[in-house]
Image (cartoon, rainbow, N blue to C red):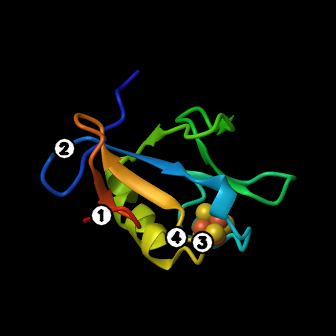
Amino acid sequence: MSVQQVAGADGAELEVWIDQDLCTGDGICAQYAPEVFELDIDGLAYVKSADDELLQDKGATTPVPLPLLTDVIDSAKECPGECIHVRRVSDRAEVYGPDVE
Ligand code: SF4
């Protein structure tokens, strides 16, 4: 079994999480990157594990696979709730999303 490659533009590993408190449930993220985001029956979006399992713990993160990086970044940019956060795994610094300084 091969290890899925995860990386950001500078080679850093990235992960993504959603703040469900702000999610409007419009589903844009799930359209852009259905491999990473999915709406649950509660109408809110959650990230999924590499095994396609919905991760519903508050602040749960999932790795961003390199081939999906653009789709995940676009989701964060277009998210009406401004609640998709992409951060570096190494130091948890947000690199795309509402908390980027
Ligand atoms: S794009 Fe943002 S607000 Fe819309 S469903 Fe996804 S996380 Fe929620």
Instruction: Calculate the distance from the C-alpha at mark 2 to the C-alpha at mark 1.
Output: 16 Å
Q: Which residue in the structure is indicated by mark 2?
A: 12
Choose top left, top right, bottom left or bottom right for residue 34.
Answer: bottom right
Instruction: Calculate the distance from the C-alpha at mark 3 to the C-alpha at mark 2.
Output: 26 Å
Can you say whether 22 is above or below 41 in the image?
Answer: below
Q: Which residue in the structure is indicated by mark 1?
A: 100
Residue type indicated by callout 1: Val
Q: Earlier in the sequence, mark 4 or mark 2?
A: 2
Q: Earlier in the sequence, mark 1 or mark 4?
A: 4
Are dots 2 and 1 in contact, CB under 8 Å? no
Mark on residue 82? 4
Q: Earlier in the sequence, mark 3 or mark 2?
A: 2
Write the residue at 50% across / 78% down: 78
Residue type indicated by callout 4: Glu
Instruction: Calculate the distance from the C-alpha at mark 1 to the C-alpha at mark 4.
Output: 11 Å
- The reply, left or right, for residue 96 in relation to residue 41 is left
Count of marks overlaid on the render = 4
Assign the N terminus to one quadrant of the image. Answer: top left
For label 4, the SS is: loop
Are dots 4 and 2 in contact, CB under 8 Å? no
Q: Position of residue 12 (x, y in %)?
A: 19, 44
Q: Which residue in the structure is indicated by mark 3?
A: 81
- The reply, left or right, for residue 21 in relation to residue 9 is right
Q: Is mark 4 within 8 Å of ligand 1?
A: yes
Are dots 4 and 3 in contact, CB under 8 Å? yes
